[in-house]
Every structure is written in structure tokens, then in C-alpha cells.
Image (cartoon, helix red, strand yellow):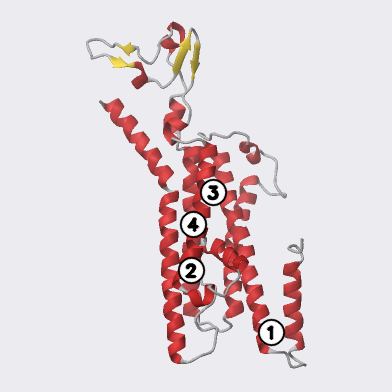
Amino acid sequence: MLAPIFPVFLVMKESILIEASRTFVIPLKQLKDLQCQVGQYVRTDLGLESHCQLTLTIILVLLARSMTRTIVGFEVMFAKEPLFYLPTDVALACSIAWSIVSTIGSFFKGISKKRKHSSSASNAIVLLYAVISIFIRTFTIVLFWTPCLGLMNCLRHLQGEMYPFYYPYYGYANANDTFHFGDADSIPWNNITRWNYTSYREASPPRHTLYTMFTIEQYFVGFMIALTTNVIMQTVAKKWTNPDVYGNASWIDLGVHSISTTFIPQPLKEWDEEDGSVASHRKRKDLVLTEMLTSILLNFGFNLLLISPIIILGNKFLKKYNKNKV
């Protein structure tokens, strides 16, 4: 219930403490803890929202522009009517660009709350890391939905098979009939057309599952299972690789952090945030390094899983091509 006003409360409290610290003595730990909470909110909630908005906008644009889309209606978005006094293409391009800037900016703001002083080289490395992570995750999600939604004109083969042959449509042929052409060997009709001829002038067109293997509903269930499994695996991996930090974290903080890590791998607590000896700093640094490598490898494996539908689509195309070649 307090979620809409809680971020405002955090930002106002931080501003008040910073302003009060110029005149009064403010406990440093209280101010640092509050800044960490604000940074966590900016880096997770705002970053996650911007990332989801970016991915959804790109999918909607590709769906409206594709000539082989399996869901119709979104092409109305690209009518001649302006959107916010701008052409629709320009308005959506500005929205995508703003989402990219917001996602990267949220990640930088979250880091700056914990690390006040950074060199230009370190900022450049963080920027490159954020851009690559956002691009890879967004690209793999778009590729996952490409076959079942028919994005980027990828279902041209299915579109070509939507036209039934004239003679079987009027003369009625079933899948067991053969096609004869001159002295060549006879060919089964199901190698020529994928239509299901049921009776005179009645035939059912092929479904898009002929190339995608699964329906859109099954793709959605698989997508949610993959994301949920990714979050669970990230949680288990972080508690295993860095138990000192994640063993003391609450399940809410750990869950929110694991969700944001599936988009941009990041540690919950940096190795240099706490005081200690050189040995303790070195130990925390090694733990954070192991944690980050494990998190990146997990995301890499799930990104490979998300591009499996496009591999299935290509395999179906090759089988169709080889069958027609024979």
C-alpha cells in the first residue's frame, strides 16, 4: 500500500539529512544506510521498469511492422495520426531511446550512491558493461518471441503456404493422395501443400505451429518458467558464492536483487563498502569476483535457452528446404 509514496519518502529523507549535516552532527552510518537504500531502489525498481518497457516497446514496434505477424491489430499504431504531435515512428523511436537512457542512468545512479569517487576509466568500463548487458538481454528476449509472433517477416514460408492449390481445393484430395507430373516419380500431396483438404471446397490452412512447434500460450508459459528459474538459480548461486553478504540479507531484498540481476549482473554489496584489514578486503574482493562470474555465466546459459525458438525455426526451414530439394 505504501509502495507509491515510499520512494518519495526515501528521496526526501536523504535530502533532509544531507542538508541537516551541513549544520548539525548526523550519524554517518545512518546517512550511508539511507543512501544505499535509495541506490538500491533506483538501480532495481526504476532500472527494471525501464528495461521491461524497452523490451515491450521494441516487440510492439516489430509486431506492427512485420508482414508475417500472427497477431493483428497493432498496425493501427502506425496510422497517419500523430502521437504527442509527432509522427508515430518518431514518437516510438524517442520512447525506445528514452528507455535505454533511463535504464543506463538508473544503473549509474544506483552505483553512484555507494561509490562517490570514480575515475573516468572506471565509469567508461561500467558504461560499456551496462550497455552490453542491456543489449544482450533485450536482444535474446526479442528473439525468443520472434517465431511465435512472426516478427521481422520471419514466417515468409508459412505465408507462402497460405494459398491452397486450385485442383485439390475443388477436386478434394487428402494427405495420402499423390501428385503426378509427367514421367517423374509421384510425390505425396503433403510434401507439396500443408493444407488439410476435408471435403469439396473445404480445407483448413496450416497453423503457425508447423514452424514454431509451440503455440503463443505455450511460449508465454515457457518464458515465465525460464525467467522464474533464472531468478531462483541466481538466488541460490549468490547465497552459495557469497554467504557472508546474502546470508544476512532479507528474503525481500534478496528476491528483488535476484530479479534485477537477471538483466544486469551486479553484487548486492561491494567488497570495499565495509571497513577492515587488508586480508578482509582481499577476501571480500575474491568473493564478489566469484559471485559476479557465476551470475554472468548463469545469465549466459539462460540467454542461450531464450534463443532456442529461433534455432527451432531455422531447423524447420532447413527440413522444408531439403524435402523440396529432394
Asked if disc 4 and disc 2 are in contact, CB closer than 8 Å, the reply is no
Q: Which of marks 1 and 3 is nearer the N terminus?
A: 1
**Tag on residue 221?**
none
Which residue corresponds to mark 3?
Answer: 224
Q: Which of marks 3 and 2 is nearer the N terminus?
A: 3
Q: How crowded is mark 2: few (under 14 residues within 10 Å), some or many (20 or more)?
A: many
| Label 4 to label 2: alpha-carbon separation | 12 Å
Q: What residue type is labelled 4?
A: Asn
Picture residue at 62% right of the left edge, 38% below the top: 74
| Label 1 to label 3: alpha-carbon separation | 39 Å
| Label 3 to label 4: alpha-carbon separation | 10 Å
Q: Earlier in the sequence, mark 3 or mark 4?
A: 3
- Relative placement, left or right, of 320 versus 279 is left
Residue 24 lies, in percent from the top left, at 77, 93
Per the image, label 1 sits on a secondary structure element best described as helix
**Image quadrant occupied by the C terminus:** top left
Q: What residue type is labelled 1?
A: Gln
Q: What residue type is labelled 2?
A: Lys
Per the image, label 4 sits on a secondary structure element best described as helix
Which residue corresponds to mark 4?
Answer: 230
Judge by depth and name the residue closer to the eye, 303 or 94: 303
Q: Residues within 10 Å of mark 3 (few under 14, many from 20)?
A: few
Spot the residue most to the front: 247
Asked if disc 1 and disc 4 are in contact, CB closer than 8 Å, the reply is no
Q: What residue type is labelled 3?
A: Met
Per the image, label 3 sits on a secondary structure element best described as helix
Q: Earlier in the sequence, mark 1 or mark 4?
A: 1
Residue 116 lies, in percent from the top left, at 59, 83
Which residue corresponds to mark 2?
Answer: 238
Q: In this view, does 256 lie above or below 76?
A: below
- Relative placement, left or right, of 311 versus 181 is right
Which residue corresponds to mark 1?
Answer: 30
